[in-house]
Amino acid sequence: MYFTILTTLLASSTSASPTFWPITQSTSTPCHSQAISPQWHDTIVSNWQSLWAGDLIYLNQTVTPNINLLQDRFPDGNGSEPLSINNSTALLNFVRNSREGFRKYEFRDLMHFGADNLVAFRWTMEGVYAGGLPGAMAKNGTVITYNGTDIMTLDRCTGLIAEVQSSQDFITYFHELRMDIGKV
Ligand SMILES: *[C@@H]1O[C@H](CO)[C@@H](O)[C@H](O)[C@H]1NC(C)=O
Ligand SMILES: *[C@@H]1O[C@H](CO)[C@@H](O)[C@H](O)[C@H]1NC(C)=O
Ligand SMILES: *[C@@H]1O[C@H](CO)[C@@H](O)[C@H](O)[C@H]1NC(C)=O
Ligand SMILES: *[C@@H]1O[C@H](CO)[C@@H](O)[C@H](O)[C@H]1NC(C)=O
Ligand SMILES: *[C@@H]1O[C@H](CO)[C@@H](O)[C@H](O)[C@H]1NC(C)=O
Ligand SMILES: *[C@@H]1O[C@H](CO)[C@@H](O)[C@H](O)[C@H]1NC(C)=O
């Protein structure tokens, strides 16, 4: 209960956590010349997971307004199309759409590590299919799990995610959904 309240309070805060910069850094140094702390890498990965788990309130404390998400072509129910996400509104819609058809849709952290403004996040999707996705023949209730890696570039001044290069095991994903991938 208290945890829920605290999480909600943190989620509604618009400012970056004080763990963004290493504690030893002088506050007078321009943000561009400072290394981003490992604690902030943990925070931003956790925020990214929360967003994808459906806590959409995390949006603005996770990504920049002009976030770029780069990944492979995406199925559109009629073949596939290039994904084009270059702002946080488009990302929010994409997260919402991606969660459709699942009664559980979460990303567990397999590993993550960072170097200054770059963070690599290896994840495993843990989902339960709820039916209704075009072309998917998996039964309602099927457990779906597959892996992927997001490489994030953080904005040096806000610490928010400015770009994500995402590679994921789509073939496994489509097999699990028993999706007809004859026409891609
Ligand atoms: C994010 O910020 C934008 C612009 O300030 C605002 O319109 C939007 O409602 C915010 N979204 C969330 C989920 O907080
Ligand atoms: C797929 O293409 C056909 C023919 O162009 C069209 O009638 C149908 O609405 C499209 N389906 C989707 C899901 O876009
Ligand atoms: C964002 O992507 C859309 C296509 O989805 C494109 O029309 C637009 O020019 C892009 N905006 C920027 C700022 O790159
Ligand atoms: C965000 O991206 C979408 C899709 O490209 C576009 O339709 C929309 O106008 C963009 N919004 C802003 C605020 O740039
Ligand atoms: C899938 O099963 C759940 C739980 O039984 C049910 O609420 C939901 O409506 C089903 N989805 C579809 C598309 O039938
Ligand atoms: C995902 O990665 C984990 C850890 O490496 C591995 O055990 C698991 O088999 C992988 N899952 C799939 C569906 O490939």
Image (cartoon, helix red, strand yellow):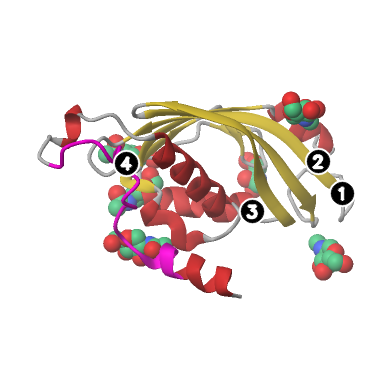
User: Which one is in front in this view, the residue at disc 1 or the one at disc 4?
Assistant: 4
Question: In the rendering, at what x and y percent does residue 182 appear?
Answer: 78, 26
User: Which one is in front in this view, the residue at disc 2 or the one at disc 1?
Assistant: 1
Disc number placed over residue 99 in the picture, else none: 3
**Sequence-earlier tag: 2 or 4:** 4
Quadrant where the C terminus sits is: top right
Residue at 50%, 65% in the rendered image = 7
Residue that lies at the very extreme toward the left in this rendered image: 28
Are there few (<14), some (14-19), or many (20+) residues within 10 Å of tag 1? Answer: some
> Looking at the magenta stretch, what is its main secondary structure?
loop
Amino acid type at mark 3: Arg
Disc number placed over residue 177 in the picture, else none: 2
The stretch drawn in magenta includes residue 22: yes
Tell me the distance, in whole angstroms, between the alpha carbons under discs 2 and 3.
14 Å
**Sequence-earlier tag: 2 or 1:** 1
What residue span does the magenta drawing correspond to? 9-27
Residue at 77%, 55% in the rendered image = 132
